[in-house]
Image: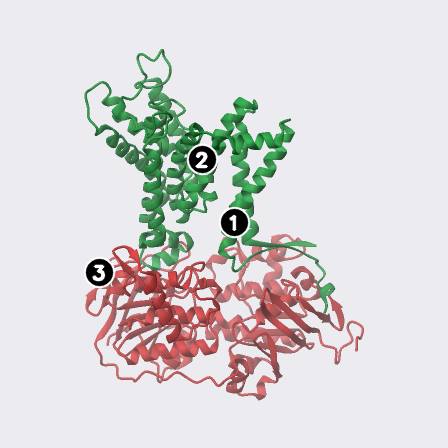
Amino acid sequence: MDQAVGSAGSTPLVAMHAIVKTFGDLVANDCVDLDIREGETHALLGENGAGKSTLVKILYGLLQPTSGRILWRGAPVSLPDPKAARRLGIGMVFQHFSLFDAMTVAENIALALDDARAVNDVADRVVEVSRSYGLPLEPGREVWTLSVGERQRIEIVRCLMQNPRLLVLDEPTSVLTPQETGVLFETLGRIRAEGRSILYISHKLEEVRTLCERATILRHGKVIAACDPRTQTAAALARMMVGADVGAARKAAGALDGPVRLAVRGLSLPAPDDHGVALREVRLEVRAGEILGVAGVAGNGQGELFNALSGETPAPDAAAVVMDGVEVGRAGPNARRALGGAFVPEERLGHGTAPGMTLTDNAILTGHATHGLVRRGFIDRAAAQAFVDRIVAAFDVRKGARDPAARTLSGGNLQKFVVGREMLGDPGVLVVAQPTWGVDAGAAQIIRQALVDRALAGGAVVVISQDLDELFEIADRICVMFNGALSAPAPADGLSREAVGLLMGGHGESNARETQPCAS
Amino acid sequence: MRLVIARRQDVPGWLKLVSPLYAIALTLLSGAAMFAALGVSPTTGLYTYFVSPLTDAWALQEVAVKATPLVLIAVGLSLCYLSDNWNIGAEGQLVIGAVFGAAVAVATHGAPNGPWVLPAMIVAGMVGGALFAMIPAILKTRFQANEILTSLMLVYVAELLLDWLVRGPWRDPHGFNFPQTVMFEPEAQMTRLMDVGRLNISAPLALLVVAVAAILLARTLKGFEIRVVGEAPRAARFAGWDPRTLTWTVFAISGALAGLAGVVEASGTLGQLQPNISPGYGFTAIIVAFLGRLNPIGCLAAAIFLAVTFIGGENAQIALRLPLDVTRVFQGMLLFYILACDAVIAFRFTIVRGDASGATA
C-alpha cells in the first residue's frame, strides 16, 4: 500500500498508527489510529481529558509519541518539532492564541513565519489571503484592540499563508458568537473547496454534524468509534463520547414571584486595567427560586461583573449591590459570605483554589468565613477535614490520595469540589461563572443539577456562561453582557438563539439601554 | 537531541526536605576541592571549618551568638518570601534597628537609670527596623516599585547613615577619634547568661521567636493567609484577604525582627555602635531562610550551620592562614547548590532523541 507521494486514491493524506503517549502513569493516548483523507473535513470528538489535544500535539510535532508511527501520504515521517510539521503542510489553530497584544496583526504573522520576510510584504499578503477567504483583517491594527473572533482570524490567516494541506482547528467556536461562528464556517467551506483537509476538534455535536463527513471519537485515550456524523443523531454521538446516556437537568419551576434576594442597581466601575472592561450601569434582580443566565462572548465584562458580585472589587456605593435587603456594595467577600452569598469563579486553578495546596487547605480558603473552621484565629484541621469529606461525598469528587493538591485533580473533579464547597452551606445567593467549562459531561450534569436544586430550594442563582446550550437548559431568564453593559433579561422560554446571538455581537445594545433592564 | 525540562506533578514532601542535605554534601565536596586548590589538606580544611567550632565551650557559645541574629532575621524573611514579598534589605533594617536602639543607650548614657533601658532599646530597635522596612513595602503597594531593588538599595542608605552617626554626632569624645560610640552602660547591654563568654538573653529570645512563628504558620489563619497570598494571590483575594495589607504586615514583622537583631548585635555582642556592626547577617539570613525551607524550625537548624561556618572561617584564618572570604565562598556555594537541588527536584530533565520514529514499538 505504500504508494509514492502524490498518488491520490485510497492512500490517506496523513495516517497515525497505534499512537501511544504516556505521561508518567497516565496513558493519554492508548493505541490510537487516525487517518485523514485528502480534502475531507474530519472531526475529532471527545470529552475533555479524552486525549484529543495530546493527539493533535503529536501530529503538530509539539509532543513526541511514546510509540507509534505517522505516515504522510503513505510515507513514514518524523515530526520532531512544529517546524517539521509545517514543512509537510500541517497548519494548526490553537484554542488559546499565542499573539503579542502590543504588536500589529502583520507583525504577529511575520514573527510566526518560518522564512524571514519584510513586514510590509507580509501585510500585503495578509490582505490578499484574508480577502480571498472572507476573513477581513487590517494588518496595521494592534492585537489588543481586536475581538476574540478577529484574533482567531489572525491565527487562521497565519496558517493559510503557509499553504497547508491539512488545517487543524482546536475547538475554534468555543470563543465565538453564533454570528462569528457563521463567518468561520463559510471560510472553512472555501478552504475545503480548495481540496485542503481539515481536522476539526470539538465537543459541540451539532457543529460536527453540519460540518464534517467523518468523525473519530475518543474516550479515555482510546478510539471508541469512527463514523459519519451526518448519519448519527446528536444524542447517539454524545452517547459514544460519554459512554452513557446524558440526561437534561430538570429545569427550575417557573414561579418567579419570590422575594428579590440579589439586586444590582446601576453599578458602574472603571476598567481595572488597560485590557479590562468597565462596567456600565449594570442592573439585575434575582428572586428566590430563580436562575438568571448571563450570556456573552468572553471578555465583555463578565469577569468584572463576577468580582463586583463576589466583593473582590467593592462598588463605589453601598446601595449598588443588595443581598437579602442588606446593602453590601462596599463589603468584601467574607461579609457577603456571612450574609449567605457563595461564589464560584471561572478560573478553578489560581482563583477558586490555590493549585499547590491540599483540598483541606482549599476548603479553608472560603470555608473559614462560614463553616466554623477557625476558632480565635486558630485553624481547626479536624473540622476542615470533615468538611472536605462531606464535599467529596455529596459531589462524588474522585481523588487518588487522601488529601491531594488541588492541581492533581482532573478539571471535572476539581470543579465538583469547588461547587460543592460553595453549595454545602446552602447559600441564599449563588453566583457561578462558567460552571462546566472544561468539565466532562458526567460532572457537568451533576453541577447543573445542583444549581437547579439550589434554585428549587429557594436560592437565587446567577450563572455567567458562554455556553448557550447550558443557559437555555437551566436558566429561567437570560440576559447578555456586551462591552460592560447588561441587556434586559428575557424569559428563556420563547427566547431565540438568534436574538441572544445578536446581543452577544453588540447589536441591539442601544435597544437594551432604552428598555431599562430589569424593570420587574 | 534536545533537552526537555518539565515540571514534575507531584514531588514527594520528603524530597523537598532532603534537598538541603544534598546541597550541604555538594558544598562540602566542592569545599574539599577548593582547599586542595589552595594547597590545604581537604580534611584539615573541612575539620577547621565545620568541626572545630563545635569542640569547645567558648566556640559553642560563639556559634549561638552568631546564630541568634541569623535566625531572627531568617524567620522574618521566611514570612516575606512565603507571601511572595522579596525583602532583600534585612541588612539595612538591622542597621536601622541598631541605630534606634543605640539612640536610647546614647541618650541615657551617664544618667542614673533603671532596668527599663534595655526593653526600651529593644522596642525602639524593632520599631526602627519595621519603619525602615515599610519604605519598600509602601513603594511596592503604592507605585508597584520592585521591592527587591528598593529594599536592597536602602541597605546602602542605612549603612551610610550609621557611618555618619558614628563618625559625627555620636562619636565617643574619649574614643581617640575612633569611629564608634561610647560603650553602653550595663543597663543598656544584653544580660549575659554565663560568667565567661558572650552568650546572652537574646539566644532564648530567638528560640521564642522561632516557636511563635512556627505556630503562626502551622496553626493560625494568618499563617494560612501568608501561604495562600504567596501561592495564589487571586485565590487570596477571593478568600477575602487584601494582599496589600499583608505586604505591609510581613515587611513590618521582618523589619522588626531584623531591627531586633541589630539591637542584639549593638548591645549584646559589641556593647557599642561601630561602622561595621554586622558581618552581613542580613544577607546571610537569606541563605538561612532558603536552607531552612522557609520554615522557622528549619531556619533554626540552618542558622546554626551557617554560624558554624562563620566561626570556622575565623579559625581557618588563624590556623590555616586562609582569607576570611573563603567563608563567603562557602555561603555562596551553599545557596547555589540549594537552588540547583530544588530545581532538579521540581523539574524533570530528560534528553530526548529528536527522531520520534526511533521509538516505534
Q: Quickly name the residue at label 1.
A: B18
The amino acid type found where label 3 is placed reads Ala
- The kind of residue on which mark 1 rests is Val
Amino acid at circle 2? Phe
The picture's colour for chain B is green
- Image quadrant for the N terminus of chain B? bottom right
Splitting the image into 4 quarters, where does residue A31 fall? Answer: bottom right
Cα gap from disc 2 to disc 3, whole angstroms: 47 Å
Are labels 3 and 1 assigned to the same chain? no
Q: Nearer the viewer, mark 2 or mark 3?
A: 2
Specify the quadrant that holds the C terminus of chain B: bottom right
Query: Circle 2 marks a residue in which chain?
Result: B
Whether residue A46 is situated above or below residue B50 in the rendered picture:
below
The numbered dot on residue B283 is 2
Asked if marks 2 and 3 fall on the same chain, the answer is no
Q: Chain of mark 1?
A: B
Are there few (<14), some (14-19), or many (20+) residues within 10 Å of tag 3? some
- Residue visible at 30% across and 32% down? B125
In the rendered image, is residue A70 in sight?
A: yes
**Can you give x and y, in whole percent of width and height, for residue A493 in the image?**
35, 84
Query: What whole-number distance in Å separates the C-alpha atoms at marks 3 and 1?
Result: 52 Å
Q: Position of residue A55 (x, y in %)?
A: 62, 70
